């Protein structure tokens, strides 16, 4: 870990054991994203985690697009924020892009969501002042600009603030953590269950944002669109997902507000509820379950069988029931 990130807040934390079986299962989720500089699936099967997963809070309004680094993420969570808008939490374990961003502020929901990972690094641009003590007390390593190594954050020319803050991951972590760092998510990879509904396109809406996933048989991936526009990297590389999870959750008011007085919603990711898993051009109805904050989230079919994911990047949309 690059210095000067403080580790004192994680001292004495009990490390959860990650079974080799679960780690091997997770690799399939990550398998196709291990190219372009990441470890091969064969290497990942036996390699333990060498560091923490990197989580980056990414802006998702029109002024922030095209975002940089989303195509390299192993997992992308889409969360509701103030005024019904959305924000992304991108997780990196098998490879690190040169740049990720634009980086924006953290929310209380991030703390519960990230508690399932072992000592994750959270890169964010700041937070509501009353939330900062909770971030400091959380089992993670916060990396805001004022606590990051020199050169970790830069402003991108041609974009206006606050939509121009970019993170350089190599400045804050020593390298990719490895597939095992994501093992605690509980995601499984394997053959698709029987049945499912053929789907060529699925749109998932937040109050003031929408995501559309279009199946490409040629690529074997879902092409990602946000607010009606196809998502690409600045160089034109499409942002895709092998598996899309629509996770229905409780979204309630938190104790925090933004500077305009809008309440910051809290997305509850501990508990259980309905889910839909899109993979291989089909939609499968199922359920999700996460008993406690330190547990990963498991997905099953309605009859209780494991609902496995396809190999490759996973997008999880946390939407209200």
Image: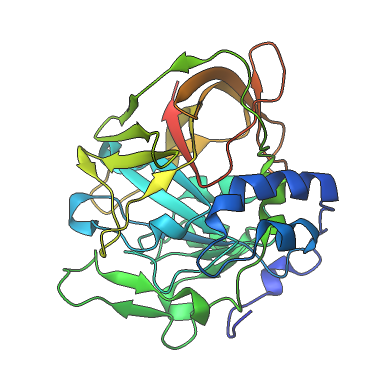
Above-or-below relation of 86 to 177: above
For residue 162, above or below residue 173 = above
Residue closest to the eye, 18 or 289:
18
Residue shown at the point (40%, 49%) measured from the top left: 88
Q: Residue at x 67, y 34 (%)?
A: 190
Residue 186 placement (x, y as % from top left): 69, 40
Looking at the image, the residue that sits furthest to the front is 218
Q: Residue at x 73, y 58 (%)?
A: 42
Q: Please name the residue shown 57% across and 35% down the image.
A: 269
Q: Nearer the viewer, residue 46 or 83?
A: 46
Percent position (x, y) of residue 221? 43, 40
Nearest the camera: 132 or 186? 186
Q: Residue 266 vs residue 5: left or right?
A: left
Is residue 61 toward the left or the right of residue 35 in the image? left
Q: Is residue 129 above or below residue 292?
A: below
Q: Is residue 23 left or right of residue 102?
A: right
Q: Quadrant of residue 69?
A: bottom left
Q: Is residue 279 visible?
A: yes
Q: Please, which residue is most extreme toward the bottom here?
A: 150
Quarter of the rendering occupied by the N terminus? bottom right
Q: Is residue 16 left or right of residue 185?
A: right
The answer to whether one can see residue 116 in this image is: no
């Amino acid at each position: 870990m690059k210095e000067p990130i403080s580790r004192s807040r994680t001292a004495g934390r009990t490390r959860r054991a990650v079974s080799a079986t679960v780690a091997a299962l997770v690799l399939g989720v990550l398998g196709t994203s291990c190219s372009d500089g990441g470890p091969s699936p064969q290497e990942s099967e036996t390699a333990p985690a060498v560091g923490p997963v990197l989580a980056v809070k990414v802006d998702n309004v029109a002024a922030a697009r095209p975002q940089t680094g989303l195509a390299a993420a192993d997992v992308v969570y889409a969360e509701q924020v103030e005024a019904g808008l959305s924000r992304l939490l991108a997780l990196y374990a098998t490879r690190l892009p040169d740049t990720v961003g634009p980086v924006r502020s953290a929310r209380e929901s991030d703390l519960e969501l990230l508690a399932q990972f072992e000592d994750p690094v959270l890169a964010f641009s700041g937070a509501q002042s009353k939330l900062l003590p909770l971030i400091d007390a959380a089992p993670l390593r916060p990396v805001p600009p004022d606590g990051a190594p020199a050169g970790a954050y830069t402003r991108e020319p041609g974009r206006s603030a606050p939509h121009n803050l970019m993170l350089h991951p190599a400045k804050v972590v020593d390298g990719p953590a490895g597939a095992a760092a994501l093992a605690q998510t509980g995601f499984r990879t394997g053959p698709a269950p029987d049945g499912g509904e053929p789907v060529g396109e699925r749109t998932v809406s937040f109050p003031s944002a929408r995501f559309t996933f279009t199946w490409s048989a040629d690529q074997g991936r879902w092409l990602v669109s946000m607010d009606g526009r196809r998502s690409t990297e600045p160089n034109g590389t499409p942002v895709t997902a092998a598996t899309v999870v629509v996770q229905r959750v409780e979204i309630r008011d938190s104790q925090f507000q933004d500077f305009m007085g809008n309440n910051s919603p809290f997305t509850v990711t501990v508990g259980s509820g309905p889910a839909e898993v899109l993979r291989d051009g089909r939609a499968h109805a199922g359920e999700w379950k996460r008993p406690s904050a330190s547990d990963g989230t498991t997905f099953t079919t309605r009859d209780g069988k494991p609902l496995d994911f396809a190999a490759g990047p996973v997008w999880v949309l946390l939407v209200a029931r």
